[in-house]
Amino acid sequence: MPTLQEPLVQEPLPLEPLLLDIEGMKCGGCVRAVEQRLLDQPGVRQASVNLLTRTAWVDVVSPEASQGDLLQSLEGLGFHARLRSSDGELPSRRERLQTRTWWQNWRQLVVALALLLVSVLGHLALAGLGAIWIHALVATVALAGPGRPILVRGVQTALAGLPSMDTLVGLGVVSAYLASLVALLWPQRGWPCFFNEPVMLLGFVLLGRFLEDRARFRTGRALEELAELQPDTALLLLGEGPPRPVRVGGLRPGDRVQLLPGDRVPVDGVVLEGASAVDVSGLTGEPLPLQAVPRSELAAGSLNLEAPLVLEVRRRGADSAIARIIHLVERAQARKAPIQGLADRIAGRFTLVVLALAVATLLFWWLLGAHLWPQVLSGHSAGHGGMGIAAETPFALALQLAIAVLVVACPCALGLATPTAITVGTGRAAREGLLFRGGDAIETAAGLQAMLFDKTGTLTRGRPLVAAVQPQAEVGADRLVQLAASLETGSRHPLGFALLQEAQRRGLELLPVSEAHTSAGQGVVGCIEGQRLRVGRLGWVQEAPAPEWLALQAQLECRGASVLAVAGEQGLLGLVAVEDQPRPDAAAVLAELRALGLELGLLSGDRQEPVQQLGARLGLRESELAWDLRPEQKLERILQTPARGALAMVGDGINDAPALAAADLGIAVGTGTQIAQDTADLVVMGDQLQGIVRAVVLARQTMAKVRQNLAWAFGYNLIVLPLAAGVLLPGFGVLLTPPLAALLMAMSSITVVVNALLLQDGAHPSR
């Protein structure tokens, strides 16, 4: 125990991970450079960079990780970064449209294409543009204008020891330009002069990036659709005056807003007046509308269908459910899957391999290749000169092939292969009410082999309801329920709440109760209409119940129900069976999960009889059931459960938090987004278990796209690298010119993005 002289040491509060927006990343080498620079900063434990969304997720463990230092360190690499706020208001639709980046570089693109056109015309000696000095001027303007950002970032990353795509393109462009400049200034050296090559190279690179950005923008469409669910304005009620339109960001808790038919709910609130059907499918994926009545809670983004409503604001726009979902999805997209980390590491090292291969290509064709096969030079064979290269000297041929190697092998497709599919999959999942914590959660979900379920609140509704009423003949069922519910008026017990719900369903008026008293673990006693009554356990309300009542109780309990007895001064009045009903889709969902090849199990803290009864109704085998488990025992079961692959635990996210955290994939059902931030890797919004099946299928579809993209990215490089290095040049006269190499490089990246976009169509591949 500490003495008075010893200061109490308080544990530091955990720091929230940072989310950075980073401009200028183009390939896997850029990703590796940014991650390495972030990890080198003090106080940073983990950094995950997404090339597609141009974001970085940074896990900081100490205040030493200054935000300013992090941003400044990236500036030194040539990447402009800014901190994305997690507590600000959602931007308006106009502001969101202004953030679209694929039109921001259109001026640069137009200039590059104009220069490309001039270069082509000059190459064809049209309109008097054939003079070599015009080619030199055009190339100089191209490098100093649209090519300057590429050259600057390429130099910065190379000096940092982390070469990127910009380094490769910059080397190719500058090599061609300098060789042509030497040929222009010192023609006696006999070097080749091809100023059109760097111009065409830049034109195709910028064109590819522009098309890639357009395709990349479509991958974020699901998140944009989520943001559009929240309107920009709301109708604020002020006293007795008419409603006034105000920005949603100006609303505060306690304000009253009017919701007309066809309006979307602007903020999280509770209904004060009116009744209407409300479409919540945009948030939860549930097709059936919610019946909103006074005291009903509505989430921002829901659609009012029928009648006007008056709402009281509970949470402002930045704290609303839709805002939390968007922030959660943004963070999820920034966290990469393990397979993506492997691809990024390969892409980062691949840049060094390409540099070495380009040098080897240059030396081979300069010093050896052109002498072994002299026919490859256009001066020796006009047939081969028609393939797009006009090299008359070994050095000219070697230089052009080396430039083609540098450009064609830029690891863009490799860097985009995984994040494109993960981003599209995460966005589509969010649109269907499935919130993955990150790419790692999607990869785990795709590899699931076993899934364990909690019982109460997961496979069951979690709200006990009256299942049977067995009264004395002279009492009647309504009278029995009326007496029992009246006694439970002040009770907070779930069984008492079930009685009150049943009385409301039957339209029964509650009777006044006097001298009410609750006996813990037993029941309630009180006086109604001058008669002393009890409701609770059968053995407590009557010391020696008749054998037929004991038999009836046993019969009801075998069905999994909890039995309440009601007794008066003259004896037992009857029994009421209260049962937690299974979710209507539970049996079908378990059957579908079995069809997907998953092993199933049920972990419950409930008694043996209800668990066995539920298992029989849902098609679970006896060996798949476990009962009377405390939270720590559920945790032990999960840690000890043998599985061929990943194991998932499905719970309500409250008392199951340890089990959710211990499983390979924790799945919380219908518990909002807060539990997702704490323990669960996947949150299924709404009140339907069907989302679990959709999540598993979507995760498998997403990882299938990842594997397809990676296969394409690696296959592309295996095919085009030898072509660029001139393997087919001696025998077939087939080679890649630098501009064609740039076009192929761009098309490979676009192909990867477009393939990932097919996930948005919701097509179901074979499972």
Image (cartoon, helix red, strand yellow):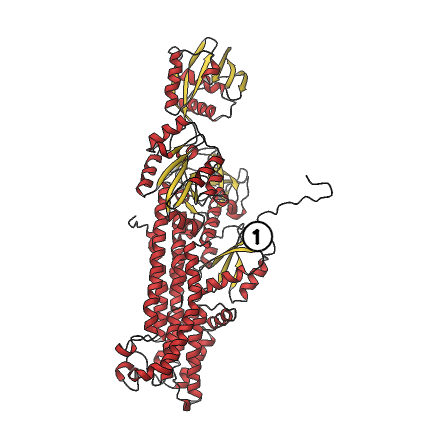
Compared to residue 577, the image places residue 733 above or below, namely below
Vertical position of residue 634 compared to residue 188: above or below: above
Along the viewing direction, whichever of 737 and 209 lies nearer the viewer = 737
Label 1 packing within 10 angstroms: few (<14), some (14-19), many (20+) = some
- Image quarter for residue 591? top left
* Residue 107, visible in the rendered structure: no
Compared with 672, 377 (above or below) is below
- x and y, in percent, of residue 256 in the image: 52, 39
Q: Secondary structure at mark 1?
A: loop
Task: Classify residue 293 as left or right of residue 757.
Answer: right
Q: Say what amino acid the circle numbered 1 marks.
A: Val
Q: Nearer the viewer, residue 89 or 765?
A: 765
Between residues 398 and 135, which one lies in front from this camera angle? 398
Residue position marked by numbered label 1 in the rendering? 61
Query: Going 25% across and 82% down the picture, which residue do you hit?
Result: 383
Residue 382 visible within the image: yes
**Residue 266 drawn above or below residue 718:** above
Residue 694: percent from left, percent from top = 35, 44
Question: Is residue 443 left or right of 21 when viewed as pictured?
Answer: left
**Residue at the image position 28 percent from the left and 79 percent from the top:** 730
How many marks overall?
1
User: Picture coordinates of residue 374 (x, y %)?
Assistant: 30, 84
Q: Residue furthest bottom?
A: 188
- Residue 461 vs residue 653, the one in the foreground: 653
Of all residues, the one furthest to the top in this rendering is 570
Measured from the top left, where is residue 631 in percent x and y? 48, 35
Position of the N terminus, as image quadrant, is: top right
